């Protein structure tokens, strides 16, 4: 793999896929997924408090090496225990026949583990957005409305991050599938069983890509719903300010005439007294 993969630019990116080598002799791949998870319990306790929402990042990196002589390996970097366990358990129950000829034999298992992580991430955000919608109390005090608006703005950046990394994840999957299909187009000399197994593996990748695309669409919907909520909160905040200004204007209209009369009488009395 190229040395620049270890650069700061690559490891601070929000996802990538790369590969090198002949699929019949020695093939290597490297790819990266990012997942963001918000703390839902902390989110629910923050609605009346404008402190920042806590969250965590899963910044996973994967490197695979494959050769037909039986040397196949995968290196997982910065994977949380649940992702590593998911991959390990799945590999124990995977048909190893495809490992003998398909350099992308590891990838469906890895992507499946990441799909589970993305699924949890999206539902955590969905619960947070739904909690905002259920706690819409615009008849409450102005302070509550202000806290509500600030909290909604804080949550919106996490929704945008989720949308961003899901877009990148679907693009990573597209590149991965494109490279595997290039390999499938050169299966001359392989048995029919091997071709069927390669097609089955490709179908799995395509299925997981569809799931990620579905998560992205759900995130699009969440983003729109949340933006509507922010707009509604802002309109109520403006209405509350307008109501307060109207009250001040009414009070002024009631008391200013009396003040004017009082000042006028005082001035008239002073002038008359001086004239005497």
Image: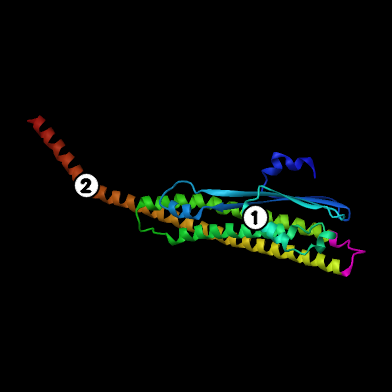
| Residue 97 position within the rendered picture, expressed as x and y whole percent measured from the top left | 82, 63
Q: In which quarter of the image is the N terminus?
A: top right
The mark that comes first in sequence, 2 or 1, is 1
With 192 as the anchor, is 143 left or right in this view?
Answer: left
| Residue 111 position within the rendered picture, expressed as x and y whole percent measured from the top left | 70, 58
Q: Residue at x 60, y 54 (%)?
A: 162
What residue did someone put label 1 on?
83
Give, as a single range, the part of the protein colored magenta.
183-192
Answer yes or no: is residue 241 visible. Answer: no
Nearest to the observer: residue 241 or residue 97: 97
Q: Is mark 2 on a helix, strand or loop?
A: helix
Mark 1: give few (<14), some (14-19) or many (20+) Cα within 10 Å: many
Determine whether label 2 and label 1 are within 8 Å by CB.
no
Q: Residue at x 17, y 43 (%)?
A: 261
What residue did someone put label 2 on?
255
| Residue 5 position within the rendered picture, expressed as x and y whole percent measured from the top left | 75, 43
Q: What element carries label 1?
A: helix
């Amino acid at each position: 793999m190229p040395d620049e993969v270890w650069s700061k630019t690559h490891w601070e990116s929000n996802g990538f896929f790369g590969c090198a080598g002949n699929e019949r002799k020695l093939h290597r791949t490297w790819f990266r997924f990012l997942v963001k998870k918000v703390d839902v319990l902390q989110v629910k306790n923050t609605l009346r408090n404008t402190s920042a929402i806590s969250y965590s990042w899963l910044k996973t990196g994967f490197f695979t090496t494959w050769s037909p002589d039986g040397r196949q390996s995968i290196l997982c970097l910065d994977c949380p225990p649940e992702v590593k366990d998911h991959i390990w358990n799945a590999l124990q129950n995977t048909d190893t026949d495809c490992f003998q000829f398909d350099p992308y034999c590891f990838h469906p298992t890895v992507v499946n583990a990441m799909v589970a992580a993305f699924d949890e991430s999206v539902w955590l955000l969905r619960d947070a957005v739904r909690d905002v919608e259920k706690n819409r109390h615009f008849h409450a005090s102005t302070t509550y409305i202000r806290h509500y608006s600030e909290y909604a703005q804080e949550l919106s950046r996490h929704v945008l991050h989720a949308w961003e990394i899901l877009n990148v994840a679907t693009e990573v999957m597209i590149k991965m599938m494109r490279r595997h299909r290039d390999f499938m187009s050169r299966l001359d000399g392989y048995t029919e069983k091997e071709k069927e197994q390669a097609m089955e593996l490709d179908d799995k990748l395509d299925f997981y890509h569809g799931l990620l695309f579905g998560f992205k669409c759900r995130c699009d919907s969440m983003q729109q719903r949340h933006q509507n909520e922010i707009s509604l909160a802002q309109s109520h905040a403006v209405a509350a300010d307008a109501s307060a200004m109207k009250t001040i204007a009414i009070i002024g209209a009631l008391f200013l005439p009396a003040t004017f009369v009082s000042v006028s009488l005082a001035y008239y009395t002073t002038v008359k007294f001086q004239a005497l």
